[in-house]
Image (spheres, grey):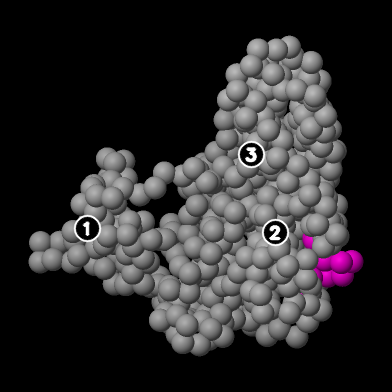
Amino acid sequence: MSPPTFRLYNTLTHETEPVEPIEDEHLRFYSCGPTVYTYAHIGNFRSFLTADLIRRTAAAIGWDVTCVSNVTDVGHLTQDDLVDPGGRDKMQQALEREGERFANIYDLARHYTEAFLEDWRALNLREPEVRPRATEHVTEQLRAVIELVETDHAYVTDKGVYFRVESVEDYGHLSGNTEAQQLQATERDVVDDPDKRDPRDFALWKHDPDHLMHWHSPWGWGYPGWHIECSVMGMQYLGDRFDLHTGGEDLIFPHHDCEIAQNQALAGQQVINYWVHTRFLQVEGEKMSKSKGNFYTVRDLINPDPDDDHVPEFVRQRGGVDPLALRYALLQGQYRKPFNFTIDTLRTASRHVQRFQEASERVDDAVEADVDGPDPIGPELGDIYDRMLAAMCDDLNTPAATAAALEGVNLIEQADTLSGAAAISARHWLEQTNDLLGIVESEHTGDAAPTDDETALPAAPLANAIDDLLTDREAARDDGEYARADAIRDTLEALGIEVMDTPEGAEWRRTADA
């Protein structure tokens, strides 16, 4: 039987459409990642979960998948609801807030990036093929900005470099914010650049030699705008035509409107065919906020501080919930509808995940026993999986998919015996269910441990990549881009590589804990 047609709601066309990859049976997409200035909350991860479900569903129908998900560690300003964000860089503001906890802004970025990746793996999200960081792609961003200035899509003022919105067609079509007067009204009392030609124009480069992260450009010292980062990193790794882009609904305007304009100006064509956005999450019927005490990070719920009074009593009593239970709870709302997350939902999800785990243990015991017998449940489990897959292909209908999955686990629980063939069918169904929904067992617990040999060299592809990074670092130092050189060194350290500068050039080796 041929797989169902994969359909998703496209924000660009306001319709639910069949997803038709540009490359046959190869889905290539970009997922907006975090700004690493603090711990990510469960609303952030609802959006990342949508991207994970897209890749799992695409793989389930036999497609190859290439996903790029970025880390923003510079340039994201506090007033990001404006067409040209003002305020302060969230990273720089966070360093001032954290006081003496971090030696510098790069330490802060590394800490919160590592925490984010821990939460990512805990929630059983699959790794993207590429996870680029904005600070490691400043050269590419500068080249793009230079190209936009040279092609008259951008212009320079004393305060920055601005994209000229008038130079492209249909700016704001994604969000519907198309009128200059309307956008001027959204700026409220924000002081903008008097040399801006149009209220819709937005910054590609900010002049600020005092910013804690700054690079030299043809227009002086400064740092890139938030919007240009994703355009550049998306096209660098996926090309000037790719299939799909995901993110939270808060990114539609202005971030994704600006991305579309930049992409069109740089590539001379529409770059992305489908835009998929996840709706906001509420907690106990209210907008999540720290002042209301209903603001939860992932680690608040899976590894809570026992002395933190804002953590729900149910969670504290258990010492934290199973991360798969949190994942399961977030699946109870279809991504395109507002979802009210409650502790009762989390409590129910915990019970259901425990049922899956107990069924999996029972099935493993039956498979190991290897007793011959009939398979009365195999055909029905197959039908249940087909319904699960059909639900996911129907615009990621996760409530219907998880409801069908519960029918499957109930069937396994009620089976009088799980002899040979039935046990094998049950094991196959559980593996399929985990591949599709990620709710049975973690896919990250079996990661290979690092080698005990401290002198062991990385595999050749990684060694070549390290050499390339060292070459880029040396070029950055020669050009006086010391912040970029330091960022490359930080990247290598995160990979467990120690860099040693010698009179003959840079050398490297594995660190003892790599």
Q: Nearer the viewer, mark 1 or mark 2?
A: 2
Q: In the visual, does 432 lie left or right of 4?
A: left
Task: Work out whether residue 450 or residue 195 is closer to the camera in this orientation and state it.
Answer: 450
**Which span is picked out in magenta?**
280-289
From the top left corner, tell me how far across and down residue 14 is, in percent.
Answer: 83, 45
Give the quadrant of the C terminus. bottom left
Q: Amino acid at mark 1?
A: Trp
Q: Residues within 10 Å of mark 1 (few under 14, many from 20)?
A: some
Residue beneath disc 1: 508
Q: Position of residue 9 (x, y in %)?
A: 80, 42
Label 1 vs 2, first from the N-terminus: 2
- Give the CA separation, mark 3 to mark 2: 26 Å
Labels 1 and 3: the sequence-earlier one? 3
- Residue 222 visible, this orientation: no
Query: Which badge, 3 or 2, is on the more N-terminal residue?
Result: 3
Residue occupying the point 28% across, 50% down: 452
Magenta span includes 150: no
The question of residue 283 being in magenta is answered with: yes
Residue for badge 2: 321
Give above or below for 368 relative to 492. Answer: above
Q: Tell me the CA gap for discs 1 and 3.
A: 36 Å
